[in-house]
Amino acid sequence: MSNGKKMNIYVDFDDCLCETARYFSGLIVEMFGLDIPYEKIKYFNLQRSFSLTDEDYDKMMIQAHKPEVLLTYEETPGAVKTINSWIDKGHNVSIITGRPFSAYEASREWLDQHGLERVKLYCLNKYGRDNFIKGSTYSLELEDYYKMHFDYAVEDSPSAFKFFEHLPDLKVMVFDRPWNQECEFPTTNYKRCPDWKMISDFIRA
């Protein structure tokens, strides 16, 4: 970014901006008596990681997407500071979340409460999660998403990598999480980052 060019940056919400999986690890203890620490969440598919029935998975996801619950998620350290530093330099940051549009208002409020009033928020159906909230809608259609251009992306889910295939020059920073340890990166443009400091240093380079 040192050349002064304005960049478009894609940032995922859950487990990039905030510690969603850590919340789920505590939630399944409360709801089902299951003790599966965050470090043992092997799959991005939480139903598989927690060995839940369809019914219990739906119950868990509905609980986790209640507005009052979404607002309690802890910030991933360094996320807000880094994103605001990009915006201060004139770069465009878009939060592209797989959350359904029913979670938009609470998600927007979380961003505003954490000092990210200036970022744009879009709900994109990344994972086909229409089962737990019936008839889910999304604010960003796939055809419109594919018209967007990004220079950098911050993402934790291997399931989302397919959404970057149309951008061969995109640099993807994969936020290091237990469920992406064994995934193979599609190209050399993917870089594993353990924290926001490395992400910040990488984009600054």
Image: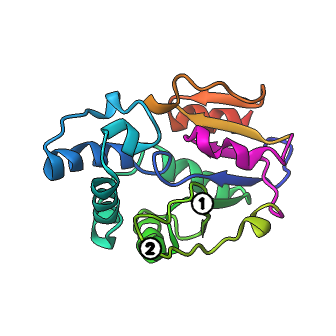
Q: Which amino acid type is marked by label 2?
A: Lys
- Visible in this render: residue 92? yes
**Quadrant housing the C terminus:** top right
Q: Which amino acid type is marked by label 1?
A: Ile
Residue at 33% over, 72% down: 67
Q: Which residues are magenta?
A: 147-168
First of labels 2, 1 by sequence position = 1
**Quadrant housing the N terminus:** top right
Q: Nearer the viewer, residue 87 or 129?
A: 129
Q: Is residue 34 left or right of residue 197?
A: left
Residue at 34% over, 60% down: 58
Q: Is residue 141 above or below residue 25?
A: below
In the drawing, what numbered circle is on residue 95?
Answer: 1
Q: Are marks 2 and 1 in contact (CB under 8 Å)?
A: no
Q: Which of label 2 and label 1 is nearer to you?
A: 2
Residue at which label 2 appears: 134
Task: Find residue 126 and report its horizontal and vertical position in percent.
Answer: 61, 56
Q: Is residue 137 left or right of residue 56?
A: right
- The stretch drawn in magenta includes residue 79: no
